[in-house]
Amino acid sequence: MASELRVDKIIPVDGVPSGGGGGIIQIVQGSTTNRVATASASYVATNLSATITPRFSTSKIYITLGGDANNNGSANYLYMTYYRSIAGGAFTNIAPNGPNDSAGADSNYGFAMVYGANSRIHVPVAMPYLDSPATTSAVEYKVYIRMQQGSGSVEFPANSGYQAGRIFLYEVSA
């Protein structure tokens, strides 16, 4: 006889710690091996995305990714960020506006930057972030990239067909 335990969330005996969650409710993964290259100073969508439908509007979504990025040349800045779409709506950049959302800060710097002063840099990237979409509708997260300065283009993932970019979405109970 098999036993099965089903719960919506697990909360520690002493309650949920301040600023922390009670546990992971679900995990979703997306992946791509299709490289996107751009020389645009504005953010451009990559082929890396995943969609999660939170069970609770109070849940947080922990986002992270794995993959190699390439600044593709000397003095190219590659910036990376996450955009979010709720219930099929418009995608918006969710990067914070800087430390403590200070005035004058710019979310165009995103969550990660790759730069090489005198060389082409090909590096692994991770961009952990805890988001609060406050919905039980489908939420799609997509990786966007842009270039600043330099010449040529920047790329993610770095090698089309050989290296995968992966995004992971964790629904975390509040």
Image (tube, grey):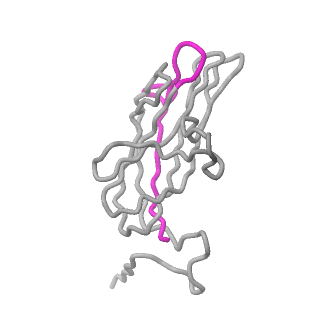
Image vertical order of residue 167 relative to residue 157, above or below = below
Residue at the right extreme of this rendering? 118
Q: Is residue 166 magenta?
A: yes
Q: In the rendered view, does 137 fall on the left or right side of 97? A: left
Residue at the left extreme of this rendering? 88
The number of numbered badges drawn on the structure is 0
Identify the residue at image location x=63%, y=47%: 102
Q: In the rendered view, does 50 fall on the left or right side of 14? A: left
Image vertical order of residue 113 relative to residue 16, above or below = above
Identify the residue at image location x=36%, y=56%: 52
Q: In the rendered view, does 85 fall on the left or right side of 10? A: left
Q: Quadrant of the N terminus?
A: bottom left
Identify the residue at image location x=57%, y=42%: 111
Q: Can you give x and y, in whole percent of width and height, for residue 128 in the image?
A: 57, 50
Image vertical order of residue 36 relative to residue 21, above or below = above
Identify the residue at image location x=53%, y=22%: 154
Residue at the top extreme of this rendering? 151
Q: Quadrant of residue 48?
A: top left
Magenta region, residue range = 147-174
Q: Can you give x and y, in whole percent of width and height, for residue 12 in the image?
A: 56, 81
Q: Quadrant of residue 138?
A: bottom left
Q: In the rendered view, does 167 fall on the left or right side of 54? A: right
Q: Is residue 51 magenta?
A: no
